[in-house]
Image: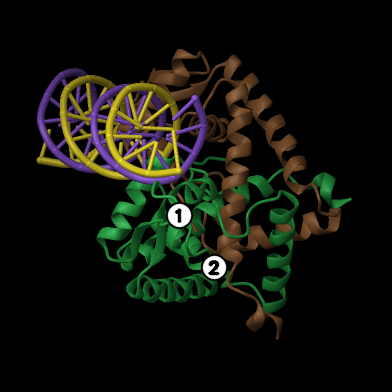
Chain colours: A brown, B green, C yellow, D purple
Amino acid sequence: MPTARRPARIGFLLTQLGSFAAENFASKTRDLGITPPEAGVMRILGRHAGMNQRELAEKLGVAQSRVVALVDSLESAGLIIRKRSAIDRRSQVLQLTDSGHDLLTKLRGAAETQEADLAEGLSADDRDHLYELLLKLSDARGLDRDVHPGYRADE
Amino acid sequence: MPTARRPARIGFLLTQLGSFAAENFASKTRDLGITPPEAGVMRILGRHAGMNQRELAEKLGVAQSRVVALVDSLESAGLIIRKRSAIDRRSQVLQLTDSGHDLLTKLRGAAETQEADLAEGLSADDRDHLYELLLKLSDARGLDRDVHPGYRADE
DNA sequence: TATTGTTATACTCTATAACTATA
DNA sequence: TATAGTTATAGAGTATAACAATA
């Protein structure tokens, strides 16, 4: 019964490695001129074009006022555009620009690089198995496959 | 070759689950009346009694001024005490109080509860394997087995 | 009246720099 | 001079509440 003898460490290790992975990715987004939360917005808009800001806030789990700042910044950088909906003029519809699509491609490249960084030290079988186990945990908790929160963490 | 077909998602999942684990633990420390960073201090002092504040700052990877605030708060709560070192009167030596030891015991209980929460949905074998894989990753990166950073994270 | 987005404001976390006491 | 700790200050990130335009 190895489980009973093993110390309670999965939570600790997930937090520690999650932090490490987040820092690692943050340094890559920094090189591309955006912050990690901005990268999250880009990723979501890449998959769900035409969202309005309220929908984006809900998906991200942040306040609408926070989305205003994120969208301001990405729009200033020329990566996305706001367009008033013709149907409901209260609503701002968000679209990636060409430049935004280019950046999204680079972000995906960064994610591939990160994957190689992180999995270093594991065999291909180990990697696949780790992926399956993590996915099982994530799905079992109903976590969104596209989103994770920015967060303040500890053990 | 399953690895080549698998999307680059280990980094994402580690960040997402790390965030989830951190939030989960934070809610438990909140019930005990302390914050997650304070819980980290308690854990370290439980293992390394007699540290001074500079050493603690180094171990945590935070500024000394941050340690002042953390220690102030834990001392006000009666969980630790500062004692001027007799050898070097600049140095403040930190010790857990009896009450601090009690709280540390409760924190360990919380970690056990969290472990059960997190591993729900995995078989005992899966849990053991996941633990081994995570530990391998953590060790391969030279991460401290006692410490992880408080952090701001994304993908 | 209700909803979308925006602005104003405040709070938390944390770091850097200046300072005090001691070495 | 150098170091341990403290205080003062500032910046980043985020939320809540008040507000404007539209429904």
The residue identified by callout 2 is B118
Above or below, A31 against A141 in this view is: above
**Crowd around label 1: few <14 · some 14–19 · many ≥20 (10 Å):** few
Q: Is residue A100 left or right of residue A60?
A: right
Residue B139 x, y percent position in the rendering: 72, 55
Task: For residue A150, say whether it is visible.
Answer: no
Question: Which residue is most to the bottom?
Answer: A1
In this view, the residue in front, A18 or B69, is: B69
Q: Is residue A55 left or right of residue B115?
A: left
Q: Amino acid type of disc 2?
A: Leu
**Res. A151 mark:** none
| Residue found 46% across the figure and 58% down from its top | B40
x and y percent of residue B8 in the render? 72, 43
Q: Earlier in the sequence, mark 2 or mark 1?
A: 1
Residue at 52% x, 44% y: name it: B61
Q: Is residue B14 above or below residue A6?
A: above
Q: Chain of mark 1?
A: B
Residue B16 seen: yes
Q: Nearer the viewer, residue B13 or B53?
A: B53
Residue B23 relative to residue A97: left or right: left
Percent of width and height locating residue B127: 67, 72
Amino acid type assigned to the residue bearing label 1 in the image: Ile
Classify mark 1: helix, strand or loop.
Answer: loop
At which x and y percent is residue B129?
73, 69
Q: CA distance from mark 2 to mark 1?
A: 46 Å
B21 is higher (above) or lower (below) than B115:
above
Q: Nearer the viewer, mark 2 or mark 1?
A: 1
Is A89 on the left or on the right of B20, as rendered?
Answer: left
Residue, x 42% and y 36% (percent of image)?
A56
Disc 1 designates what residue? B87
